[in-house]
Image (tube, rainbow, N blue to C red):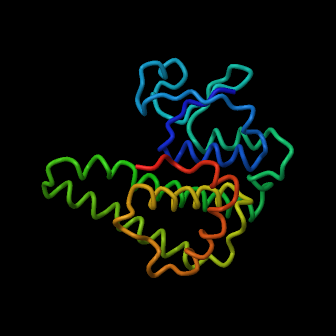
Amino acid sequence: MKLAYSPASPYVRKCMASAIARGIEGQIELWTVPTVDPSLVPVNPLSKVPSLVTKEGQCLYDSPVICEYLDSIGSAAPLFPAPGPARWNALRQQALGDGIMDATQPRRREVALPQDEGRVTYIQGQQLKVARALDALEAEADSLGMLTTIGEITIACALGYLDFRYAHEPWRPGHPKLEAWYAKVVALPPMAKTMPPAG
């Protein structure tokens, strides 16, 4: 397998953390490319990371699809539960974690541009989405496990991205249960082995 890769991408981190949790990271060749690269177009017409070329030559994107594919191979316990309430909960948590990343990653570009009223309103709206998501996660933090589902892995990667890119906007105040959970899981191999580069 070949994974189009950017070490700072939280979506790539999610895929690699899933591979580590499944015990198959050694089967993945990392293809390091800029976030947007013309060489990605034959693999992914959106020219985005993560993109995966399977050993059969099939091209998959983006992180929810790639992670579910990775979950279909390997011998460790599956990250995607069987159909039923546990699965829908894991998928909902994945959507919440992805939503935090969706609201934070593009905002880095916006703050570098002239701050007109529309851009300020957009940034504030994205910040509010993250704040609401963090409050929702705090309310369910007691039920979060040790990176045993795709939802928990995605949430951990989202929190890690907030630390990585938005340390000046700390998420821990007001979220003590979520902070305690993250402190435990960030030391586990899926997170510890996928830390983004410093600086």
**Closer to the camera, 19 or 59?**
19
How many numbered tags mark residues here?
0
Residue that appears at 69% across and 75% down: 143
**Closer to the camera, 52 or 17?**
17
Task: Describe residue 196's horizontal placement relative to residue 110 as left or right.
Answer: right
* Rendered location of residue 171, percent (x, y): 44, 71
Task: Describe residue 129's horizontal placement relative to residue 80 as left or right.
Answer: left
Instruction: Write down the quadrant of residue 167 in the picture.
Output: bottom left
Residue that appears at 69% across and 59% down: 188
* Rendered location of residue 182, percent (x, y): 60, 68
Residue that appears at 44% across and 79% down: 173
Instruction: Write down the quadrant of residue 83 in the picture.
Output: bottom right
Instruction: Write down the quadrant of residue 142 in the picture.
Output: bottom right
Task: Describe residue 37's horizontal placement relative to residue 25 as left or right.
Answer: left
* Rendered location of residue 117, percent (x, y): 14, 58
Task: Describe residue 183's horizontal placement relative to residue 165 as left or right.
Answer: right
* Rendered location of residue 107, percent (x, y): 32, 52
